[in-house]
Image (cartoon, rainbow, N blue to C red):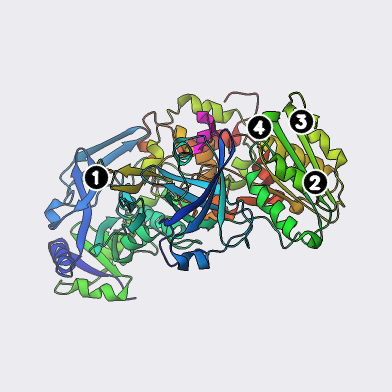
Amino acid sequence: MIDRQSNPYQPHEVVILERIQESADLFTLRLKFTDPDIQDNYVFEPGQFNMLYLYGVGEIAISIVSDPEDSHIIDHTIRVLGRVTRGMANLKTGDRIGLRGPYGRGWPMLEAKNKDVVIVTGGLGCAPVVSAINYIEQRRDQYGRLNIVQGVKHSADFIWKDRYDDWRKLADTKVLLAADVGESLWPWHIGPVTVLFDQLEFDADNVSVMMCGPEGMMRAACKYMLNEQVPAAQLFLSMERNMQCAVGHCGHCQYGSQFICKDGPVFSYDKIQPLFDTRGF
Amino acid sequence: MKPARYFKSDQFQLLLDNLLRGGYVCMGPQARDGAIVFDSFTSVTQLPQGFNDQQAPGSYSLIHDNSSKYFDWANGPQAIKPLLFSPRENLWVSEQAVNGDISFKSCEPELKPMAIIGARACDVAAMKIQDQHFLQQLFVDPYYKARRANLLVIAVNCGSPADTCFCHSTGDGPFVDAGADILLTELQDGFLVEVHTEICEKFLKGMSLHDVNQAQNTEAKKIAINASRQNRKLPAADIRSGLMKKLDDDAWHDIAELCLSCGNCTAVCPTCFCHSESDAPELDGSSSTHFREWDSCFGQGHSYIHGITIRADTSQRYRQWLTHKFSSWFDQYGRSGCVGCGRCITWCPVGIDVTESITKVMTHQQGKTP
């Protein structure tokens, strides 16, 4: 939990307990605060994010993928993309970085209880929803039917195959995968993820849809769900914009009147709908 | 609150002396490099006595006449904002030990109390908006808070708005309603003074104060009426919803044809709060300073995210700025983000007039070039 009395801009030291190479340009850092008091008081919700600081380089916003009750280890899956993440890719077990958070509002896990859940994710946007899937996995009997739809550009981008195989084995769970471009031995659908929607199993009056990924994909998913009579307030989107302060001050993540860092990153569709079809916000 | 009183101009230095003796750093307007700027001062002779500013879209010049007034000008490129929300400011320092441990140290400033003399109604209104943003939301900004904590605002009602001013139509000026600790109105040979924060009465100690007579009252009223007659105003239509209905209008492109996307408007705007954060590592690698500096939504990097620039076009950036300032700001802070100071008009190198831009977008009919 963030102590709002202390300086919200200042990170705290964390140690890398483990570093996992997920794919060529994707790695997971398992982190723990070096100050046990901070670690003990650290509480987060699935869908929230932290600001990670690489010494002498800078900060980045990264969503938390671990389970909130998972023995107080904070997992971040990071794609090598810019200056900070390139540097972070070289970190080893035992190295120290800075962390502040958690920030923002996460997935509506409590409100979704006893409902069917549809998870729609695309590209490499899956990390923020993995925390939600893990959360349901740990409490499988508290939720209705679980649908996981994942689309990737190229089948080679598909990571965490083992996890998807595990999820497929869960009770009342459907896992649907699609790649825009496939390769030999890709056993799943080739084409846009949206064509898989007809295979979903949910009760439109009693469902919570959680999505994360390219906005075009989320736009298509919202359109489909609204057409299926799912209420706009039950469509949840994890939004992304440039973030530097994470506390609603620096202005970069503004989306109309919303500050994605503190009012989001998870929004119900009705909150962002006025701008969602317009490019450039 | 006590009724207004009057003091002659020769008493003005005593007010300044009282503040200086009270431990205040006094910041006030000065004529420098052809513009009114705010800097520390200890004598009223440093004030821009006899200066008047001529402002127009894309143009600013100071002229000296024989007026004895200290505040016979509208405004300069900056006033209060840089004193409270610093253009560049260290946030924290990280140090790395030989064994790789990292420690963090906050750089929250410890400051002497500061008195700003000569703030305008637009500046005070903008400060109240920045207070909302940095102090009254989910998170409090400790750096802004430190600068704001020991601040005294001695505002001076505006008697000579520039051609670019439109504070009367935003409801923020030219006279100050609230937000100042002491309020002055400059007459021909002296000042009316109102103490809005009771504890500040002590700063008038030793000054020769008089009841305001009929003639002085009339003179002040005349100044207020004249100052309210401004050449520019915001359109009377519902700008807040009107702009949002025109997000896809070609008028944005027409404006973008002129706009250089330089960010001057956001740099001089007294309410713009965007800032970026960066790290400056020491050469020996033992420590690194994390700082913030003002940023602009007109910059390429403002909307950058993992390889994509969300607002690649100038039209999208101008639309972001204008719709934020005049529409979504209402949702965030209950009012418009514009206080009518006109700085964005004056300091725009190509003279884009924000009041005209609003009218252009709201009245433009798709398919017809105005």
Task: Classify residue B201 as left or right of residue A129.
Answer: left
Closer mark to the observer between disc 1 and disc 2? 2
Q: Which residue is mark 4?
A: A157
Chain letter for mark 2, please. A
Chain letter for mark 4, please. A
Kind of element beneath mark 2 = helix
Q: Which residues are magenta?
A: B303-318
Closer mark to the observer between disc 4 and disc 3? 4
Residue type highlighted by circle 3: Pro
Residue type highlighted by circle 2: Arg
Q: Which residue is mark 3?
A: A192
- Does A123 sit above or below residue B46? above
Closer mark to the observer between disc 4 and disc 1? 4
Q: CA distance from mark 1 to mark 2?
A: 69 Å
Contact, CB < 8 Å: mark 1 with mark 2? no
Whether labels 1 and 3 share one chain = no
Q: Which residue is mark 1?
A: B36
- Does A62 sit above or below residue B152? above
Q: Residue at x 14, y 74 (%)?
A: B206
Q: Which residue is mark 2?
A: A168
